[in-house]
Amino acid sequence: MTDSSFVLAQQRVAARHRARQAQLAAADKARHRLLPFSLEAASSREGTRPAFRVSQVDAELLDDELVELLRAQVGDALRYFGDGHLQNDWSAEVSLVLRALLFKLTVWDHDATYGAALQNLRYTDARRDGPVLVAPSRLQKSLYGLVTVVGRYAWTKWEDWLLDEDEPRSFLSRWTWRLSTAHSAAALLSFLVFLLHGRYRTLLDRVLRMRLAPPTSQVSREVSFEYLNRQLVWHAFTEFLLFVLPLVGINRWRRWLSRTWRRTKDMIRTDDDGDDASRGELAFLPERTCAICYQDQNEDPTTAMMMAAPSGVVGSAQTDVTNPYETIPCSCVYCFVCLATRLEREEGEGWTCLRCGEHVKECRPWSGDVLVRKPSLATKTVAFSNEGNSHNMSFFQFTQGTESRTRPSDSSPLLGRYRAVPPPRGSDRLLAGEGRGSVHVGYGALIAAALDGDDDEDDEDDGRRNGRWFRDLWVAPRQSAVKRAVDRWWRLYGLVVVLPAVLVVGWCAIPLPQYPLHGTEPEPPDKSPGHGAARVRLNFWFFLFVYYGFYSLTALVWITKVFNLYSLNWWPRSLGFPLTLSLIGALSLAVPIPVYFGRETRFLTEHNTAWIAWTFVVMALPVAMALAILMSNERHVGVRRHSLSETQRIFTSSWWSSEPDQRRRRDDGAAVAALTAAVASAPSVTAVTASAAVRGGGGRSGRRGVGWQPASFVRFLWLCVALFIGLLAYVLGEAYAEIYLRTLPHNSLETVVYVYGWVATVHLLDALTGWTLGIREGERVGSYPLSWVFKLYFTLTYQTYVRALYARLRSPSQFMVLQLLSSTSLVVLTPLSMTRLCHRLLVVTGLNGQSYGSYQKVQARNVFIRFLAENGSMATFLGSVAVLHYGSNRHVYPYFALDDAEGPYDLELTLWASSVTWACELVASLAVRALIRICFRVDVAMEGRQDLVVWPELLPTCVTVALHVLQNMMFSIIRLQF
């Protein structure tokens, strides 16, 4: 083959190959061209924005589900109105309103439904071509809303009308069916075209030329997470509400709203409805049926059930009354379990009877046809009123001197164990003193539960009960009254924190008559700059009888309350408490008068320390009188006791020293050894006294008298020691404050040294007082309530001086340093001190002998007391600073005036920084209480309230102590010049 023939052959092969390629391309193009070109050309408008069919269908499904969800929620809300018929009768109207609202909020405002927005789609006007999508016109959106909202409602009502017709109209029904069928066929055809091209999702969209398209050219098939994030936020908010609602008592508010609504309906009823006003919602039930059981099984009573009630066919064996109890006062009969459950669920606020609509708080066994009396004592109150004999139960251990309910004789060593205002004879109330010595966790809860209602007080009318409120809470506290007072946290803090603060602020705000200073009278140098130089002269008589009189009265009431906790009268029985208190009060006001008139002694009236020292002398008078009464009745030391019983003599030294005047000689060594072993577990003071007596008797052959020292007298001496330590704490506090104020100004380091030096001093004195008082019987005084009160006294004393220090801080950094150290020590050290390791270390070193449960109880009590002291002292400080700065006594209290424009101390800084400090203290206190509850399962607030209920005398004593200590702070900074 020549070269030319080879070239020709190659050309023929290439031509055949080109022809075959052209044929294949034409066949492929013909295969894809199934519809006319005009329909295919319409798809060219999409450009680079493909309309995903799945997204458009999902958007429609989401919109339908949203409407159904909202309609279900509205239906559930309407179920409780109109006997439950509104949900069915007005379902079409509800759908109309919901669709109209959704259309306005979605398509009309944003050109997209919620489902379309979730799929990143938006309605556009398909009539306009171009790279930029155009929003639908108002006419298009109006027609869209008219058809989807009003059209659907009209078609639904039309079909319902046809179905409700008694005589069906064949012509209208036939044409309605034909229109519905034609619309369904057209919608099916349109949907098939949509699946092919993906442009118009529904028949209405195709008619109005509205289509869903992505708003941007960069199309992504990812779903927007905006609504998902919103849903998560709402879920979190809902869970938070479910957590908070039980804390705010939503059931109580619901009951209050329901009662208010019921009373409103009763007020607007006409006279014709008077018969129905006294009927409950289930008044149609027969007597044998328990209305509560019936309501639990039939949530929505229907008209058919009400019509069937007279025939007696309503109910079943499951709803018959079991163990019948009748309500008070309407006497409607229910099952006991059902009625008790409903009353307990209402938490003492009463329940509305389902038969008659009465307000029920109590129930009693059904008497049937038996005629019985109607005394209130025969009733039985479920969960809120006490049994008639419940107060006779006692959980306390035996305490010497309480074996009889009669008054002890004068020769008894426990003379004076009465209250300042003794309870009426025949009252079987459990005394707070009987609980002395118990600090076990949960012990007070049993007592509080057993004494929930103390007496038949619930049987009294409201007026009499309100009249006894003051006596039952302040004069002669009762557990039932105190329990009601501290049952709510706002009542507790209102009494212990707010009340003393308000009284002190009001006391220091009393306008004192003021006169200008004499021009020739120089200010003594020893009184400045500690509390500021005196600016005015005061009226001595007004100060003495009004200002100091209230201060002295508070001090006497405080010492009286301490003796009440100790269960000892300090006044002579022949004079009585009111007369003795009046005499001491008159003496406290009379002694300063000659001091004021004396030329050589008048300067004492201008010294705060002199007034405070005289106040403590007045407070010491009750202690001295009590000691004199004990000694006059030979309660201290004597050589011969002629009226001791065998039981009393076991606890005296005469038993062991074998004095010649004892009735029976104990010469038998075995008997003495047995008794010695028996007393080995007795209180330490008695054991020490007995051992000393034995040693004294064995060392001398001569029969000399041995002192008789009963445990009650030794306890009183220890109480005197505790009171002296409290006086010492206040004197040291005055010295600390004077030293600090005379060396102003200070930097942050000096401030911290002063504050924590004072903290260490107060804690040492507090520990010494706590050891002196003890919390169990046999530990010196052995009084848990007294240790409670003195703990509050020392904590408040420490807090008041720290608050007074805030008035002389010059910068926020000083506030910050103090608060950082205080909050850190509270949050960190307090939980650590409650651990078993810390308790074990204290036990090993001999610093604590309590069980771990008792130790936790005491530590929780201390946190509760600190919380009260911090809030009370800070509230008093802020209130007094504001009142004294803007009030008429600003010149009497120059320390709190803060009105020197050129001085380094500013009122705005003091109030702002103190408020921030208070907020930080609240957060720290709540945090440490939460840590204690989580780590140790101890509720600090519950433990504190429990103590106040178990020992009801604690509440008025704590209020008096807080008032007295806060008054000390204000009295120590007043500038006196008469």
Image (spheres, helix red, strand yellow):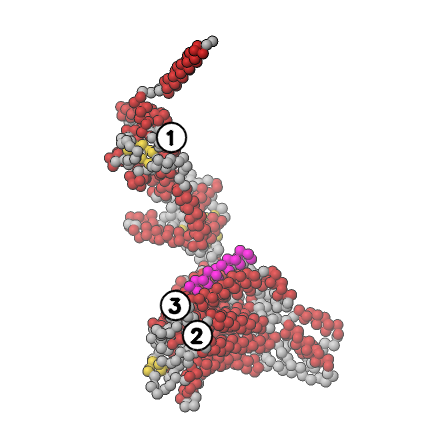
Instruction: Residue under label 1, please give it.
Output: 53
Instruction: Please state which of residues 73 and 892 is positioned toward the viewer in this rendering.
Output: 892
Secondary structure beneath label 2: loop
Secondary structure beneath label 1: helix
User: Could you tell me residue 315's position as x and y percent?
Assistant: 44, 40
Residue type, mark 3 in image: Leu
* Of pointers 1 and 2, the one earlier in the residue sequence: 1
Instruction: Residue under label 2, please give it.
Output: 745
Apparent side of residue 336 relative to residue 535 in the rendered image (left or right): right
Mark 3 or 2: the one toward you = 2
User: Could you tell me residue 306's position as x and y percent?
Assistant: 38, 41
Instruction: Residue under label 3, please give it.
Output: 909
| Residue 417 visible from this viewpoint | no
Mark 1 or 2: the one toward you = 2
Q: Does the CB distance between marks 3 and 1 fall below 8 Å?
A: no
Q: Residue placed at 50% from the left, 57% from the top?
A: 930
